[in-house]
Amino acid sequence: MVYRIRRLACLAILTLGAVGLTSVPGSADASLVYAVQVGANSPAMDDGDRWPELGASFQLRGGYALPIPFFDLEIEMLVGGQLFRGDTSRDRLPMLWDARVGARGGASWILYPQGFMHVGYGRAFGYPHGAPQGVIADIGAAFDLTAIPYLRIGIFGAYNHMFFADTVETSGGDRDLQWFSFGIQGAFVDD
């Protein structure tokens, strides 16, 4: 059952990514967007021995921006890692690697407010009870400054949730992984 869910999730992610990234190039007004996000993460709830205090996050994004009057819609893929600070007596700190597809939209002004949502698949390493994996989703907001041509620099904040495909037992019971991430981002827009 777990393998079937895993295969379906991977197939859905690859299909959405392929459709999203190959259907747009024919549009004359579409722009390529390459971005980097660097920040911190914090647990959404205290979960006993599993939860770290504060960690770091790093993500690379790529996609297409479709201009609509007074609005931009970006279809994007991202890959990244989350390093969670935890018990330093273990060999390594808990870490999560993931790949996601999704969209972000915002008003295309000199100050560029955006909302975004992604879904994908991730795998966590360094936990005392194995390497949990499962579907991961996020929802968040960002605020960029677009005064410099071809460049956007700003801040972001997001709520992330990893729905474990495997049962992971902790002292607090079986729980999914939930955290907030926040930080800075920079994007190059190839018009």
Image (cartoon, grey):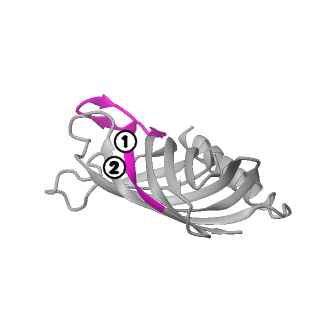
Residue, disc 2:
41
Q: Callout 1, which amino acid?
A: Trp
Q: Position of residue 70 (x, y in %)?
A: 71, 47
- The answer to if 152 sits in the magenta stretch is no
Residues packed near mark 2 inside 10 Å, few (<14), some (14 to 19) or many (20 plus): many
Q: For the stretch drawn in magenta, what is the main secondary structure?
A: strand
The residues colored magenta run 161-185
Front-most of residues 153 and 157: 153
Which numbered marker is on residue 179? Answer: 1
Q: Position of residue 92 (x, y in %)?
A: 24, 61
- The answer to if 162 sits in the magenta stretch is yes
Q: What residue is drawn where x is 18% and y is 57%?
A: 90
Q: Is residue 189 left or right of residue 169?
A: right
Q: What residue is drawn where x is 69% and y is 50%?
A: 72
Position of the N terminus, as image quadrant, is top right
Q: What residue is drawn where x is 26% and y is 57%?
A: 93
Q: Position of residue 32 (x, y in %)?
A: 69, 66
Q: Mark 2 near mark 1, Cβ–Cβ under 8 Å? A: yes
Which numbered marker is on residue 125? Answer: none
Q: What residue is drawn where x is 68% and y is 55%?
A: 14
Does 166 appear above or below 30? above
Position of the C terminus, as image quadrant, is bottom right
Q: Residue furthest top?
A: 173
* Element type where label 2 sits in the image: strand
Q: Position of residue 118 (x, y in %)?
A: 57, 46
- Residue 99 found in image quarter: bottom right
Q: Earlier in the sequence, mark 2 or mark 1?
A: 2
Front-most of residues 132 and 69: 69
Q: Callout 2, which amino acid?
A: Asn
